[in-house]
Amino acid sequence: MFLHLGNNYLVNTKDIIGIFDIENTSVSANTKEFLNFAAKNRRVVNCTYEMPKSFVVCLDKDFTETVYISQMSCATLLKRSKRMPE
């Protein structure tokens, strides 16, 4: 199944490692370092033109991480992911 992240961006739910609140997690030095590393390696996909509320980390089949920045809240994305059949 796929999870809609906003603005016609979809990710496979099997690829999702985690869904994170951008405001609460970006204060950590480790998270900042991770996001900067992903951006430098062009592994960040910006799914919004609005203020971002969350980011979703996915692991592709070739074990490369991709970070999706979304305007959807973590709660919304979590509700959407739980409504999907297994």
Image (spheres, rainbow, N blue to C red):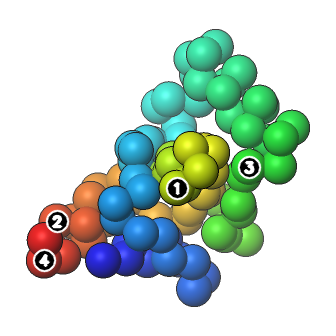
Q: Earlier in the sequence, mark 4 or mark 1?
A: 1
Q: Where's the C terminus, which quadrant?
A: bottom left
Amino acid, disc 2: Lys
Secondary structure beneath disc 1? loop
Secondary structure beneath disc 3? loop
User: Which residue appears at 47% of the width and 31% of the height?
Assistant: 24
Q: Earlier in the sequence, mark 2 or mark 3?
A: 3
In this view, 26 is above or below 19: above
Amino acid, disc 1: Lys
**Local crowd at mark 4 within 10 Å, few (<14), some, or many (≥20)?**
few
Residue 27 tag number: none
Q: CA distance from mark 4 to mark 1?
A: 22 Å
Report the residue that reaches farthest toward the bottom.
Answer: 8
Amino acid, disc 4: Pro
Disc 1 vs disc 2: which is toward the camera? 1
Q: CA distance from mark 1 to mark 3?
A: 14 Å
Which residue in the structure is indicated by mark 2? Answer: 82
Amino acid, disc 3: Arg
**Local crowd at mark 1 within 10 Å, few (<14), some, or many (≥20)?**
few
Q: CA distance from mark 1 to mark 2?
A: 23 Å
Q: CA distance from mark 2 to mark 3?
A: 26 Å
Disc 1 vs disc 3: which is toward the camera? 1
Specify whether 18 is left or right of 41: left
Secondary structure beneath disc 2? helix
Contact? badges 4 and 1 (CB < 8 Å): no
Q: Nearer the viewer, residue 66 or 79?
A: 66
Q: CA distance from mark 2 to mark 4?
A: 8 Å
Which residue in the structure is indicated by mark 3? Answer: 43
Residue 85 tag number: 4
User: Which residue appears at 30% of the width and 77% of the height?
Assistant: 1
Which residue in the structure is indicated by mark 1? Answer: 61
User: Which residue appears at 65% of the width and 69% of the height?
Assistant: 47
